[in-house]
Amino acid sequence: MELLTTVLVTGALTSAAYALMALGFSLVYGVGRTVNLAHGSYFMVAAYGTYAAQQAGLPLALAAAVGILAACVLGVIVDFVVISPMRDREITILIGTLAVALAVEAAIRIIFGVGNKRLAGFADGAHTVLGVNVVSARIIAAVVSVVLIAVVLWVIGSTSYGRTLRAVAQDEEAARLMGIRTDRLQLSIIVLGAALAGTAGVFVSPYQVLYPGMWLAPLITAFSVVILGGLDSIHGTLVAACILGFLDRLVAEALPDGGTKAPLVALALILVVLVTRPQGLKGKVLA
Amino acid sequence: MTTLRRRVLPAVLALALLLALPALVGDAVLIRVLTTACLFAVLAASWDLLSGFTGQVTFGHAAFVGIGGYATALFASETTANPALALLIGPVCAALFGLVIGIPALRLQGPYLALATLAAASALYQLIFVFKDKTRGEDGISGLTTLDETAVIGDIGRFIANILGGQGFESARPLARAAYTNYFLVVLIAGAVLLLMCWFGYGRHGVVLRSIGQEETAAQAAGVPIARYKVAAFTISGGCAGLIGALMVLTRGSASTDLLALDLSLIVIVMAAIGGTGSLIGPAGGAFVIILLQDHILELIPMVEAEPAYKQLTFALLLILVLRFLPHGLFGSLQETILARKRSPVESPLDSASVGDSPSEFAKEVQ
């Protein structure tokens, strides 16, 4: 029983963080058909940006804003340098955004050094939820994640901006002919994706450590969640985030030495799903 | 078949140069760097044969290297047979893995395939730690017999080194002599494999593979057995990468987790893309550029020596520039300007794998 509540509580928190990370990745693919391997770099740049702003003496809220802004700026750079000029060349974008991610990693290492850094969060200490002891920063991250996901779903479903997004996702050519400025829209969605990943970076990093290779884990998480759910399905993304989040905690808590086995089980699940359902779990929702 | 000859000629010349080089430079450190470069050249070319030609981009090429390498290390440490036999066992294991992974990979494309291969390689990486008692986990398997110490193959290597090694080899200490011997063996084996790959890639099979990368539906409609070719590409590419894994282990005398690490898969892609995918020679050249920059040229700059991250920054920015301005890569573009004087411009090989081989040549080569 204790195991069950532990898995339920920590699994829910993990799933929420996964979903926030994957949401932007999914949006960028759904609208622009681009797999952006620099997505994890937004996460890292936001975390390091917040750290640097804090060191410079800014209050936390302002520092977080600086961090997220830095992620957005990186998003614009990625769009101008790689994605826009190489649009329609899927594989080139894959490799180009990988190059950006490697360049950002190197730049962070040069500026901040290889050592681990700690980011102060919005809350210290821990809370007890359903009898399970949880770090407060994780709860805040999960709440932020759920609120943002709700906002994004509302924007896509109920605003005119969301309608144009869906139109471009369905048929970019037709949308352009209907007078939608698709290039601007693509840029806006990349910035939105960067902002979401950056927000994840600001809220998730306080209970992890900052180091120059930290972009990879969230990228692989986002990639896995989105592929598992089906690249162009937002609902699939959310379902997949929950599956992977709960699975991770279940394996880690229930099996002996589960921490090392959890990634293996997740990878095996991804491989099995991909082989049996090559388009991911869910069909198209956005498109 | 003149295309084949014109394309392979530079490779043969490069091979001759590599064999002559030790007598000219006579520096054991540089010899070790060149050994690494030769290994990565074949590795990048093998990635290209699979991903550049057929458009099935894999992010898990390290899986093949790791399987070849660990099979070699286990064979060398658990049996008393000649470790050089692992040069057969490593590639066979990796090729079998290529076959096994190639069949389900048929159902996947684009980003789905990229993630699946990445996941497969990561899963293997995790397995090293699950089977810690055999693989010795993080420590790796060390203290293995190196290639120059093996019977027959090692003797051949020393024989060649005696002839071609020059002053540097004769005056060298034992450890440096081993480096020379390994270098010549690696150049010969890697060169032979690269030539075989060129023979395969520029012959009729290569044309078929490119047609899959270019326009899969059309190729299928034209009666190309796509599935068979794709799986064959996985198997051959995997086997070649497995051989490199075996050679890496046999030249170092140890196997460690970096053989299976994601970093290896990524750097291979960087090398291939910088050199120019879809041309085999391009990625091989790209590997030389990256390894020489990384282990030799950039080391000479004090700023880089103090902070190795500048190397990665250099490679990443170079890659972005190449992707933006030289869609055929450094060597692909060079080769195209030499080869394609009469031909109309072709699309990026990354997306269409359409280097050379106009339809008329296709017809000629099939006949």
Image: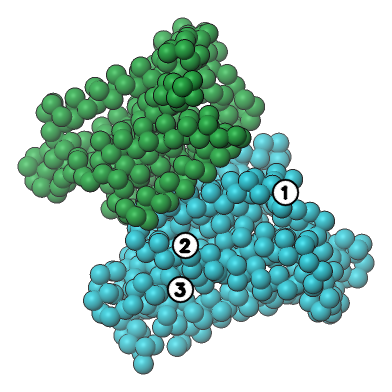
Chain colours: A green, B cyan
Question: Crowding at label 2, few (<14), some or many (≥20) Cα neighbours within 10 Å?
Answer: some
Q: Which mark is residue B232?
A: 3
Q: Is residue B302 above or below residue A44?
A: below
Q: Secondary structure at mark 3?
A: helix
How far apart are the two marked residues, 3 and 2, measured between alpha carbons? 11 Å
Give whichever of discs 1 and 3 has the lower sequence position: 1
Residue A154 seen in the current view: yes
Q: Secondary structure at mark 1?
A: helix
For marks 1 and 3, give the one nearer the viewer: 1
Going by the numbered disc 3, the residue's amino acid type is Ala
Taking the view exactly as shown, the residue that stands out farthest to the left is A178
Question: Crowding at label 1, few (<14), some or many (≥20) Cα neighbours within 10 Å?
Answer: few
Q: Which mark is residue A9?
A: none
- Tell if the residue under mark 1 belongs to the same chain as the one under mark 2: yes
Across and down, in percent, residue A76 comes to 34, 33
The residue that mark 2 highlights is: B101
> In the figure, residue B90 lies in which quadrant?
bottom right
- Residue, x 46% and y 57% (percent of image)? B58
The residue that mark 1 highlights is: B133
